[in-house]
Amino acid sequence: MISSGAKIVKALIRAYTYRYRKRQLSLSRSLRFKNTLYKAPKSYIYRVLTFDGIRAEILSRKLCSHERTIVHFHGGGATVGMNNFYRRIARKICDLTGYPVISIDYRTGKDLVHPALLDDCYRAYKGMIEAGLGPANVIMIGDSMGANLMFSVCFRLRDEGVALPVGTIAVSPYVDLSASGDSYRKNCYADPSYSLPKNQKFEEREQAIRRISPYCGNTDRQNPYLSPAFGDYTGFPAALIQVGSCELSESDSDMLYDRMLRAGVPVTLHKYDGMFHDFQYFAPFLKESNVAWSEIRRFVKKL
C-alpha cells in the first residue's frame, strides 16, 4: 500500500497534467524550464568543464571521497537541458554517496534526432577517460531518457573495446522508444503524468498513448542504440533498476531486466507499488522516495 503522501502527490500531478494528457501532448516538449545562474552551497565545489567540446558540470563536497566518481545522465525526453532541478539531483547523489558527480550537459532540442544526444554523451565520457578518469572507478546513473543514453553509451563503449563502468543505476528508464510493451495498455489510466483521461478509450488513442518520440527520426525504433531495451548486455556490470508500478513505460524496465538476466548481468529490478515516473525526486517528502534513495546508496557502496 502506498503512503498517504504519495496518494496526494499523485492526485496533484494528475490534476496538473490533465490539460496535456487530454491531448496526449509530450510533457517534456510542452513545459518550459528556466536555466538560471547556479551557485553551489558553500560546502561544495562546482566547476564547469568541457570534454571533447561537450559541456559537463562537476559537483563535489569539499571533503568528498574520490574512491568513485558518479557520471550523471539527466532525463528530460531529449528536449529539456541541464537546469537547476537536475543540479539539485546531482547534489542529492553527491550527498548520498559521498562521491563527486559529473553531469553531462548534452544538447537538447525539439529538432534534434538520433544519434545527436548519444554522440554528445559518448564524446563527453570518452573525453573524461582521456583526461584521466578511470572506468574502474565510475558508476553511472540516469533517469528516464538519461537512462536510455547511459546504456546506449555503454553499448558503444563495449562495442569499441573501451572499458565499462563498475555499475549502472537506471531510474524509471525510458529504453523502448518503440513503446511496444504491455504497460502502455495496462497503465494507460494509472500513470498520473502520461495516462489517458477516463473519458478516452485506449483503442481510439493507442497511437498517441504510445508516444513515439520525434527524436527517433529515421532510425529503426528497435535499434539498441536508440532503444536499449532490445540490446545485448553481455559483459555489462552490475545494475540497479527502479520503476513505479503505475508508470506508462513500466514494461521498459521489464524488458531491460530480462535482457540483462539473459546476458548474465547481476541485476536488481525493484518495482515500487503504486509509484509514478521519477517518484524518487520527491524526497525527502515521500516515504517511498526515501526508501528508493537508500537502496541506491546501498547499491553504490557494495560496488
Image (cartoon, helix red, strand yellow):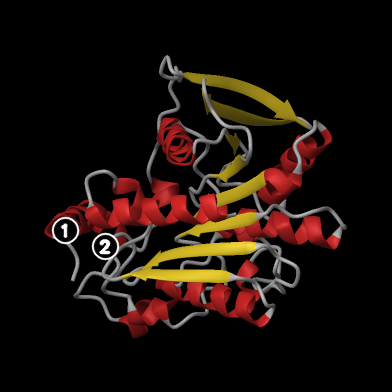
Residue at 59% x, 29% y: name it: 57
Secondary element under disc 2, as helix, strand or loop, is loop
Is 50 situated above or below 148?
A: above
Residue at 60% x, 56% y: name it: 168
Determine which of the numbered discs, if any, sits on residue 192 in the image: 2
Cα separation, mark 1 vs mark 2, equals 7 Å
Are the two marked residues, 1 and 2, in contact with CB atoms closer than 8 angstroms? yes
Give the farthest residue toward the top. 42
Expressed as whole percent of the image width and height from the top left, the position of residue 299 reads 50, 56
- Front in this rendered view, residue 173 or 223: 173
The tag earlier along the polypeptide, 1 or 2, is 1
Which kind of residue does numbered mark 2 sit on? Answer: Pro
State the count of labels: 2
- Front in this rendered view, residue 229 or 296: 296
- Front in this rendered view, residue 171 or 265: 265
- Give the left or right position of residue 16, taking residue 246 as reference: left
Determine which of the numbered discs, if any, sits on residue 11 in the image: 1
In the picture, which quadrant includes the C terminus?
Answer: bottom right
Q: Dot 2: within a 10 Å radius of its alpha carbon, few (fewer than 14), some, or many (20 or more) residues?
A: many
Expressed as whole percent of the image width and height from the top left, the position of residue 181 reads 49, 80
Is 52 situated above or below 223?
A: above
Q: Quadrant of residue 6?
A: bottom left
Which kind of residue does numbered mark 1 sit on? Answer: Ala
Residue at 50% x, 70% y: name it: 268
In the picture, which quadrant includes the N terminus?
Answer: bottom left
- Front in this rendered view, residue 150 or 132: 132
Secondary element under disc 1, as helix, strand or loop, is helix
Expressed as whole percent of the image width and height from the top left, the position of residue 129 reads 79, 39
Determine which of the numbered discs, if any, sits on residue 142 in the image: none
Q: Dot 1: within a 10 Å radius of its alpha carbon, few (fewer than 14), some, or many (20 or more) residues?
A: few
Can residue 237 be seen from the camera position used here? yes
